[in-house]
């Protein structure tokens, strides 16, 4: 099996790129040497190939060899708006959602959310999970993970859908990829009546995930899996 080259995140693609402390530590662990080549990306969609030109005890630098187009993104950005979940469930969704092409994660406070809010340390951890997942999945984009807001404050440009049991619509029958896409997934207890009223005011369309009731951490991945399976 062919091995992928190491991927390194940089602040911006330029002729010479100094590495952050975290990426320097990563290179040291991987035991790379001057002259070795790596894949680089900036987290905003730019990617390329670079050569390690400097490495000492405290710092490292790369030289950009070429820029590369990334084919790992959808035609339009995809936002996953997800109700707050307890434990490590949010981390699992962010990790898998990044692999499945999410551009932005918007955390939501809903009536039946598992927890009322999360702290800054948890938010920082989720962002680190997204970066590592982007690196592993060969993406040039690191999704943003946005601080929680109430469902009433959510805005969604373009097409907007939410998963709701018993709905007649199917996601792939309605997605057109002519504009940005927002997918909304609720908590373990589902959407409260006031949540559903807000989703209606938002103009979101209810869609089905099939005849089975899915757990709150499974439903958003089912939505994203449908997009991924479409081959777009």
Image: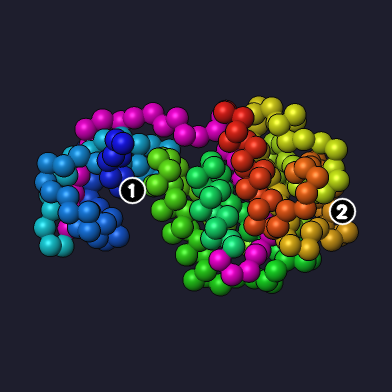
Residue 158 lies, in percent from the top left, at 69, 36
Q: Considering only vertical position in the picture, is 185 above or below 187?
A: above
Residue range in magenta is: 59-88
Crowd rating for badge 2 (residues with CA inside 10 Å; few <14, some 14–19, many 20+): few
Residue at x 26%, y 35% (from the top left corner): 49
Q: Residue 100 versus residue 41: which sits nearer the camera?
A: 100
Quarter of the image with the N terminus is: top left
99 sits to left or right of 208 = left
97 sits to left or right of 65 = right
Residue 21 lies, in percent from the top left, at 26, 61
Q: Which residue is mark 1?
A: 9
Q: Residue 21 versus residue 211: which sits nearer the camera?
A: 211
Q: How many marks?
A: 2
- Which sits earlier in the primary sequence, circle 2 or circle 1? 1
Q: Secondary structure at mark 2?
A: helix
Q: Quadrant of residue 189?
A: bottom right
Can the viewer see residue 138? yes
Residue 160 lies, in percent from the top left, at 73, 41
Labels 2 and 1 touching (C-beta < 8 A): no
Q: Which residue is mark 2?
A: 197
Residue at x 81%, y 36% (from the top left corner): 169
State yes or no: residue 73 in magenta.
Answer: yes
Residue 130 lies, in percent from the top left, at 47, 53
Residue at x 71%, y 31% (from the top left corner): 172
167 sits to left or right of 85 = right
């Amino acid at each position: 099996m062919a091995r992928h080259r190491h991927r390194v995140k940089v602040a911006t693609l330029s002729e010479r790129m100094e590495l952050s402390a975290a990426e320097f530590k990563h290179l040291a662990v991987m035991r790379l040497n001057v002259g070795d080549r790596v894949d680089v990306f900036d987290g905003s969609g730019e990617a390329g190939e670079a050569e390690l030109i400097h490495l000492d005890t405290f710092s490292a630098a790369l030289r950009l060899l070429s820029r590369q187009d990334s084919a790992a993104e959808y035609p339009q950005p995809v936002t996953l708006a997800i109700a707050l979940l307890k434990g490590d469930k949010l981390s699992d969704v962010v990790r898998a959602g990044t692999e499945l092409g999410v551009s932005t994660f918007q955390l939501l406070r809903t009536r039946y959310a598992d927890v009322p809010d999360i702290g800054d340390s948890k938010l920082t951890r989720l962002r680190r999970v997204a970066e590592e997942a982007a690196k592993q999945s060969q993406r040039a984009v690191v999704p943003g993970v946005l601080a929680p807001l109430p469902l009433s404050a959510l805005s969604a440009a373009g097409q907007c859908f939410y998963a709701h049991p018993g709905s007649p619509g199917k996601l792939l029958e309605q997605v057109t990829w002519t504009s940005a896409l927002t997918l909304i997934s609720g908590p373990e207890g589902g959407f409260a009546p006031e949540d559903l009223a807000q989703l209606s005011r938002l103009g979101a369309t209810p869609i089905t995930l099939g005849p089975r009731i899915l757990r709150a951490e499974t439903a958003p991945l089912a939505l994203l899996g449908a997009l991924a399976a479409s081959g777009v």
